[in-house]
Image: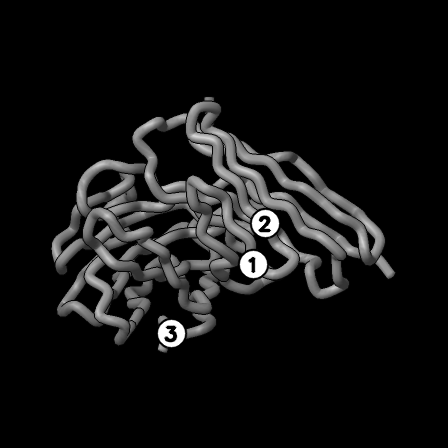
Amino acid sequence: DTEVTQTPKHLVMGMTNKKSLKCEQHMGHRAMYWYKQKAKKPPELMFVYSYEKLSINESVPSRFSPECPNSSLLNLHLHALQPEDSALYLCASSQAYAGEMLRAFFGQGTRLTVV
Amino acid sequence: RKEVEQDPGPFNVPEGATVAFNCTYSNSASQSFFWYRQDCRKEPKLLMSVYSSGNEDGRFTAQLNRASQYISLLIRDSKLSDSATYLCVVNRGGGSQGNLIFGKGTKLSVKP
C-alpha cells in the first residue's frame, strides 16, 4: 500500500475562517511533508516532520500551523488566510533515515480557495 | 543559481519519438535524485529514482553525473499517455531526514 490520503479534496474558506487539512499514511514512514503548489509552478516545500517532530519550516507565515499527532497523521491548521494562499496543498511521506533513497509518495492534494 | 534547474520546454513530439530531459542541481551534498511526473491538476507521482550507475525501466532511462551535477531522463518510443510535466527532484541532503526540492518541470506533449 503506497497510499497517502488527504482530506478534504476541495476547500473554500473565508479570510476569517479556521480550517484544517488532514493527511494520513500507513506505510510506516517517519517523515511527512507539506508542500504548496500554485498553478503552473512546481511544488514548494513548507514543512518537514521527522519522527513526529518539526524539523524544517521554510519560513512559512504563522497563519499556517502544522501538527503531527502521531506517526501516521499530519495536519495543517489554517487561520486568517489571504486570497494569495489559494493553491493545491500536497502532503507527502517517506522513510526518514539516511542511506535510503527517501522516495516520497504524495497524496492527491487539497485544492484550497480563499475568498 | 537555482537549486534545481531543468530544460524550459515545452517539448512537442510525435508518437514514437525519443525525447531527452536534462536537469542540473547546485548542492553537491545531495544524495537522492528522482524523476516525477505530474498530470494536469493531479499530484506528482514517482516515475523513477536515479542511481549513480544509471538505470532503465522499460522505455525510460535515467542517468546521473555527480561530477557535473547533472541528471537526465530519456524516453524512447513516446506514447500519447506520456504527455505530462516531468519534474526533476533532488534531496537537499544532509541529516537523516530529507526534503525534496523540485525543478520547475518540463512539459511534454506527445501528438498523434
Callout 2: residue from which chain? B
The mark found on residue B103 in the picture is: none
Name which residue lies at 47% across and 71% down: A10
The mark found on residue B57 in the picture is: 1
As helix, strand or loop, the secondary structure at mark 1 comes to: strand
- Farthest top residue? B1
Name which residue lies at 28% across and 37% down: B93
As helix, strand or loop, the secondary structure at mark 2 comes to: strand
Q: CA distance from mark 1 to mark 2?
A: 6 Å
Give coordinates of residue B76: x percent, y percent: 71, 52
Neighbours of disc 2 within 10 Å: few (<14), some (14-19), many (20+): some
Q: Is residue B111 left or right of residue A103?
A: right
Q: Quadrant of the N terminus of chain A?
A: bottom left
Asked if marks 2 and 3 fall on the same chain, the answer is: no
- Residue type for callout 1: Asp
Question: Which mark is in front, 1 or 3?
Answer: 1
Asked if marks 1 and 3 fall on the same chain, the answer is: no
- Residue type for callout 3: Glu
Q: Which residue is mark 3?
A: A3
Callout 1: residue from which chain? B
Q: Which residue is mark 2?
A: B61
Name which residue lies at 45% across and 42% down: B53
Name which residue lies at 41% across and 59% down: A89
As helix, strand or loop, the secondary structure at mark 3 comes to: loop
- Residue type for callout 2: Thr
Q: CA distance from mark 1 to mark 3?
A: 22 Å
Callout 3: residue from which chain? A
Q: In this orientation, does residue B101 appear?
A: no
In the image, residue A70 above or below residue A83: below
What colouring method underlies this structural image?
one colour
